[in-house]
Image: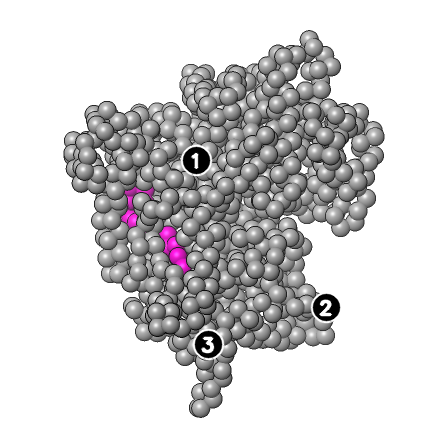
Amino acid sequence: MLINSNLYNCEPLTAPGTKPEALSVTEFRDSFVHKFAAMHGKPLSTATDGEKFAALAALLREIISKNLITTRQERARTDPKQVYYLSIEFLLGRLLATNLVNLGLRETCAEALSQLGIQLDSLLPEEEDAGLGNGGLGRLAACYLDSMAALGLAGHGCGLRYRYGLFEQKIINGYQHEYPDNWLQDRSYVWEYRRPDEQIAVRYGGTVRMQTNGKTRFLHENYEQVMAVPYDVPVVGFQNKIVNTLRLWSAEIDISHYTCCRQGADCNSVIDYKHGVEALTDLLYPDDTHYEGQLLRLKQQYFLVSASLQSIVRSFRLNHDALRLLPAKAAIHINDTHPALAVPELMRILLDDCGLGWDEAWPLTVATISYTNHTILPEALETWPVTMVAQLLPRIHMLIQEINERTGRELWHTYPGDWDRIRAMSIVADGQVHMAHLAIAGSHSVNGVARIHTEILKQSVMRNFAACTPDKFTNVTNGITHRRWLLTANPRLAALINDAIGPDWIKTPAKLAELAAAASDPGFLAALAAVKLDNKRQLARYIKAKNNLTVDINSIFDSHIKRMHAYKRQFLNVMHIMDLYNRLRADPALTIAPRTFIFGGKAAPGYYKAKKTIKLINTLADKINNDPAIRDQLKVVFLENYNVSLAELIIPAADVSEQISTASREASGTGNMKFMMNGAVTIGTLDGANIEIREAAGADNIFVFGLSANEVLDYYQQGGYNPRELYTSDPRLKTITDQLVNGFFPVGPEEFRLHYDDLLHHGDEYFLLQDFAGYVDTQNRLAAAYCDQQRWQRLGLLNIAYSGWFSSDRTFAEYATDIWQLTEPVPFWNQDQPGIYDQLRPLARQDVLC
Ligand SMILES: *Cc1c(COP(=O)(O)O)cnc(C)c1O
């Protein structure tokens, strides 16, 4: 067995024919010193951490730039099929540590800096956390970029360069307050390359005139033009010298409007124009509770789509004459429906700019575009008022109408006379454009993100479409990049794994399964426990610094971190904690396995109930943390401003992973995978990817409870759920529910009235009362398992061992072969051992949903 603790720079990690950057410690140190001096013009001894970070990032950028150029030259020569992943969100997090790891320079850099008296770890927090996303969907996009580069695919992200990321959350008096996330700090982003020479004009408003001399043409006139300027963020492949890009578009004024201002034209309208343009890429998800906000969102979506597609087609045409080759050379993937305007926009480009006819353009469009659905929550299925689309995007509106008519006609052939069905499937209905329907019509592939989610899509939400074109529908279960979430975020665990099985798992994460052999090795289990304890200590220090709270590192660290949302049921977790607390209060002699409950998550600014849940958690925390009667057996922590960097701190330190969504509501989840990979044990419902986690880890190695997805869907369809009965029959539930409003908390009776009413008077939509008893029992079983430390460590180990399936490398190999049909040889994750993933593939069990 290969023993190698030198994690980041050891030979066996390299892909065949490539190697990490060959830079000695001395060279690295000297380059850094030079860079620093050139950049700041002052002695290193007087430098701030921020200045040192800036110099280090600039140094890495030089190395990355070289690789970016060679990657581009190589691609120009080999002309591989390019993948473009369009997403309104990219939740990148910080890039310094992952770039170092991917370049194979982390050890070299740490050593070089330490020779200068600088701690690498103290520079990492100097980087802003690029939060150009809201949650799982955006983080998924970022994980996929990492995997595409690691696999050597020519795959690029296309997104928006928001001036402000998702808001910064501060907790004041228990409440969430939102502050602008000024991540650019009025500077440019250290990693990006601005490329003004590749800017693209995007057009809004105006009129469309049909011209029919010979061939019919559509002329777009009197429009307002906005310039989309690309900023490329390099995406560094894992020790393979490949650098892909994430292209983020920024809105800028079209300078010609300014010229007329100087000549004394209507200056006010020019100023309005400037403000409008600046607003376009100011914010992610502008408030859409009013018309202007909605309009701005639609404008953003079109901006992303139009700039990306024009740029894609332009670069395609630089190298190819025949447009019919487009699907062979470009795959355009839309991440949820936000970029669904890609369908009419590609048609517009092919028809109006390239001069194709409809019958040529439509098959090319469908063959090029593919679509991932991320949710079945009805409120998240996007629609736009037809009038708004018509006014803002007149040509796109015409094309949507045409697509709608033609698909309607086809449906009429398939289902003659079945008006109800055709209506239910139409793209334009009731004055609204249905973006999911548009995306399905214009894509050759539609996928859900976990097996159960795809099944629900096929059986309910998209039932009609699946019946009509069953071959379009496929499942690709989400994944996460193990290079960020294990190798970078949990270096101690990564080193321990290397000691046990060598570093091949980094290239082939399925090989983590070899760790299972250590399940009966007490020495290894003890080492694993020591790593976890170290990570818990580190998190405890953070909690002390941030929340001024001391937590017991030997208690169970139970973590519930994700967006605040009713379906994710942070409130159910709260109910369990309240019950535990009530038990301890009732019996002062009671001794339990001590627990630290850790929460983190942002609530959408307009989401009243989710914000109240934050207040509820903090109010409960105050009460419990300050009650001497329970002898420090419980602690509750809400860590503010949950983001990627905080996740990287919390997940390696977690014992328990809370994945307790109402079954059927969570499409996949990816937080669940990150925890599993770091050896936390899941307590969860049979929802999203939890089902596949259970199959992969083994049913004994995860704690499951609650209604099944089918039971939930049946209740939704047929009714019959009676929460009041549960409230009256279970005294624990009566106590907890009443405590929300009876003065138990030192707040007024109205503070948590909504939570109370939702349980008792609004039908308990997410089945908290129903799932409570099972959840409490399962928590008790879990605590018992924790008390047997050997057994607990084994659970954690087996979760790590069987987490390889959830690497986004596996996900991407599936996309590459099944959906994008990349014809070039791809250095696949399983090249050494064909079939290794098939052995791990969770069984396709029929009983899950049907
Ligand atoms: C992984 C991740 C998510 C998604 O978490 P879920 O538990 O799947 O909802 C959201 N936000 C951040 C910062 C993440 O890292």
**Residue drawn 57% across and 36% down?**
176
Comes first in the chain, label 2 or label 3: 3
Q: Position of residue 806 (x, y in %)?
A: 48, 40
Horizontal arrangement in the rendering, residue 847 relative to residue 529 (left or right): right
Identify the amino acid type marked 3.
Answer: Asn
Identify the amino acid type marked 1.
Answer: Ser
Q: Quadrant of the N terminus?
A: top left
Q: Which residue is mark 1?
A: 645
Outermost residue toward the bottom?
213
Tell which of 45 and 263 is nearer to you. 263
Q: CA distance from mark 3 to mark 1?
A: 46 Å
Identify the amino acid type marked 2.
Answer: Asp
Comes first in the chain, label 3 or label 1: 3
Tell me the SS state at disc 1: helix
**Residue drawn 31% across and 55% down?**
194
Disc sitting over residue 275 in the figure: none
Horizontal arrangement in the rendering, residue 189 relative to residue 585 (left or right): left
Residue 243 within the segment the image draws in magenta: yes
Q: Which residue is mark 2?
A: 420
Q: Residues within 10 Å of mark 1 (few under 14, many from 20)?
A: some
Q: Which residue is mark 3?
A: 222
Outermost residue toward the top?
589
Q: Which residues are magenta?
A: 235-251
Horizontal arrangement in the rendering, residue 694 relative to residue 534 (left or right): right
Tell which of 53 and 506 is nearer to you. 53
Q: CA distance from mark 1 to mark 2?
A: 49 Å
The dominant secondary structure in magenta is strand
